[in-house]
Image (cartoon, grey):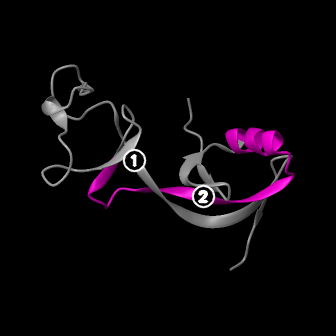
Amino acid sequence: MKKQKLYFSDFDEERAYTLEYIIDEMKEREITECKVSVAIRDTAQNYFFCIAVQEVSTRPPEGEPCGKVCRDYKPRNGKNGCCKFRGYCYTPGDKFKLSIDGKLTLIMS
């Protein structure tokens, strides 16, 4: 399964979603267009998104307990190492106007 692109919307600038989700939200809010920006994975930072607790955390040793000391820790390989709940943080990229029919139009800065 191909991973779908994620976007930030002007009605939720903290979390990134698929276009399908944003369009469903637009229908729910009864709006025909909104501004979105492409979510770019941010791998150079010292923080990560924990899927288990749905929060951004700082990587150890400065941050919250992670790994074996975390009650939600589940290693990807079933033994040790990186937790399967470790996710990525994203930063906004190119901005677009999204219409209710799914059409994206680049917004020139």
Could you tell whether 26 is left or right of 89 in the image? right
Q: Give the range drawn in magenta.
A: 20-48
Res 68 → quadrant: top left
Circle 2: element type = strand
Q: Which residue is drawn at the image coordinates 16% and 49% (left, top)?
A: 60
| Residue 61 sits inside the magenta stretch | no
| Residue at the extreme bottom of the image, as rendered | 109
Q: Is residue 79 above or below residue 104?
A: above
Q: What residue type is labelled 2?
A: Val
Q: Which residue is drawn at the image coordinates 54% and 55% (left, top)?
A: 39
Tell me the residue that label 1 is attached to. Answer: 88
Q: Is residue 30 above or below residue 90?
A: above
Instruction: Tell me residue 35's x, y (percent).
Output: 72, 61
| Residue 25 sits inside the magenta stretch | yes
Instruction: Tell me residue 78's x, y (percent).
Output: 22, 19
Q: What residue type is labelled 1?
A: Tyr
Query: Which residue is more in the foreground, 32 or 78?
Result: 32
Tell me the residue that label 2 is attached to. Answer: 38
- In the rendered image, the quadrant that contains the C terminus is bottom right
Q: Which residue is drawn at the image coordinates 37% and 34% (left, top)?
A: 53
- In the rendered image, the quadrant that contains the N terminus is top right
Q: Which residue is drawn at the image coordinates 80% and 47% (left, top)?
A: 102
Could you tell whether 104 is left or right of 58 in the image? right
10 Å crowding of disc 1: few (<14), some (14-19), many (20+): some
Q: In terms of sequence position, does the residue under pointer 1 or pointer 2 come before the other?
A: 2
Res 18 → quadrant: top right
Q: How far apart are marks 1 and 2 (CA)?
A: 14 Å
